[in-house]
Image: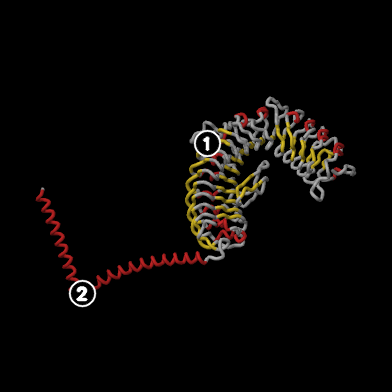
Amino acid sequence: MPSWEEEDCCNWEGVVCHPTTRHVVKLKLSECIQDSKGQVHQMINSSLLALTELNHLDLSYNHFYNVPIPKFIGSFKKLKYLNLSNSFFIGVPTGIGKLSNLTSLSLCYNQLQGSVSEIHLENLTRLEVLDLSYNYLKVSFDPNWVPIFQLVLVQLSGCEIGPQIPRWLQLQTRIDTLDLSNNKIAETLPSWLVNVSSSTLTSLHLSGNQIKGKLPTFSDASRLINLRLDTNQFEGQLDDLFSCNYSSTQLPSSLQNCTYLSYLDLSHNAFSGNIPPWMGESLQGLQVFRLGYNIFSGDIPQQLLLLEELKILDLSNNNFSGSLPYYLGNFTAMASISRSFEFTEYVDLVIPTKGGNLHYPYKSDLTTSLDFSGNNLTGEIPPEIGRLTGLHNLNLSRNHLSGKIPQELGEITLLESLDLSFNDLSGTIPNSLADLNFLSYINLSYNNLMGRIPSGSQLQTLSDPSRYMGNPRLCGPPVSSGCSVTETVDKVQKMRNFEWIWLSIAVVLGFLMGIWTFCGILFFKREWRYAYFRGIDSWYDRILLQLLFCLARLSGQD
């Protein structure tokens, strides 16, 4: 740290002084304490202790490599805000428990190690924000501990809390955000947890555990914005999610009021049944809707069209059947070219795209994605999908889709990843795909496609031939240098088709000529005409006589 011997430190960037006493009260030194090599000069200097009026200290996003949090941090008696996140601190945060005026404590994304118990927090009577996520800590509290504070934000992701959820949370009545993800929690979800602080809870994050059984009833979810229950072992149907008394004709009143829900992730569980129509009718504020890797079945309900704010829809790896709904092109947010993505808190999205899993961890500039892969969908890809001009990722692989690839896909101008592999698509690859300037991944393998692969400035950079394998009638770069063999086969096939057409025309024309020739002869040759009609009359009389004879014999037998 620089020394404090300058004459007027209140003019320094990141330093805030009291307007009258000129004492330093705030230090906002995020992302600024680095040398030319990007590392800090040794440890935090104890000269900071001279700042006796300090109430706000932010040293986040710096590079304190292998430096422990200094014990003298506990000497700032007036400190209310302490943020040391993302700064590579190590060790156990001792001394922080002496900060009796502290209201916000953020130590996330460091390399802290060791055990944290209620002893470290017992003097923090005013604490409202506690974030210890993404360290190597083991947070272990006495089951009978009664905290003396009321938290608003609790983020303990990856703190080895499991296998049980801390019971002291049941006493917290003001929680707005609760994150217990990736904690090896293995019990069934207690009913008190989903209803803790039910009047204030906006975000509940329990993903990455081994929580079993059915979900308890959400008695009041009116303020809920983000709900992440993915990567657990939940089961049952979504009708049970918010009310045990749900019927097909009546929506639960608590869900009808859940107008703020924008992030719903139930992927990687064992939910089954159909997607209930009320999810489109009542959750119209959804921006992220993920049901992948479950056992859902049935058709994709048309009520999903009502989710006008939806930017990420993941129904992958289920048992959905039927055809792709034509209304997919009507998702308003996906049809917008705006890249904004508004969330009230930090989110960490993992999107299967471009042949892998990519992280989109920030509030804005996130992707838009439509993923129906790994289902039993049939029929053709609706051309209306071309209306989604703001879509970045489209994955329809591993289904039973047939027909041609629609030319309208070339209208999705922001498309970055396209996966149509392992289907029954036929015909040629539309030339419009060569106009997708942002396309960085394409997979059309294992279909029945034929003809030359389109060439374009962007497609020429996608030179992996495996993305087209399983289509033996495709030709041209990158699968082959030319199209001579395939073109010859196509020409032979076309010649055979023309031969059949000309043969049919010849037969029809021959028949017509024969009829006209015969009729012309009868018209001009009177004796031939008389002989022809006498012959017909003679055959007619013989047949009629035989018929009358048979009828007489049958009448005589009766």
The secondary structure type at the circle numbered 2 is loop
**In this orientation, does residue 301 appear?**
no
Q: Position of residue 399 (x, y in %)?
A: 51, 49
Q: Position of residue 294 (x, y in %)?
A: 54, 41
**Badge 2 amino acid:** Lys
Count how many numbered circles sit on residues in the image. Answer: 2
Residue in view at x 38 percent, y 68 percent: 502
* Disc 1 and disc 2 in contact, CB within 8 angstroms: no
The residue closer to the viewer here, 466 or 440, is 466
Question: Which residue is outermost to the top?
Answer: 144
Q: Is residue 441 above or below residue 304?
A: below
Q: Which badge, 1 or 2, is on the more N-terminal residue? A: 1
Question: Which residue is outermost to the bottom?
Answer: 524
Comparing labels 1 and 2, the label whose residue is closer to the camera: 1
Residue in view at x 60 percent, y 34 percent: 211
**Badge 1 amino acid:** Gln
Q: Is residue 437 above or below residue 232?
A: below
Q: Which mark is residue 237?
A: 1
Q: Position of residue 296 (x, y in %)?
A: 52, 41
Q: Which residue is mark 2?
A: 525
The crowd level at tag 1 (other Cα within 10 Å; few <14, some 14-19, many 20+) is some
Question: Which residue is outermost to the left?
Answer: 556
Residue in view at x 90 percent, y 43 percent: 5
Distance between the Cα atoms at labels 1 and 2? 87 Å
* Quadrant assignment for the N terminus: top right
Left or right, 458 with respect to 324, comes to right
The secondary structure type at the circle numbered 1 is strand
Residue in view at x 46 percent, y 66 percent: 491
Q: Position of residue 176 (x, y in %)?
A: 67, 35
Q: Is residue 435 above or below residue 371?
A: below
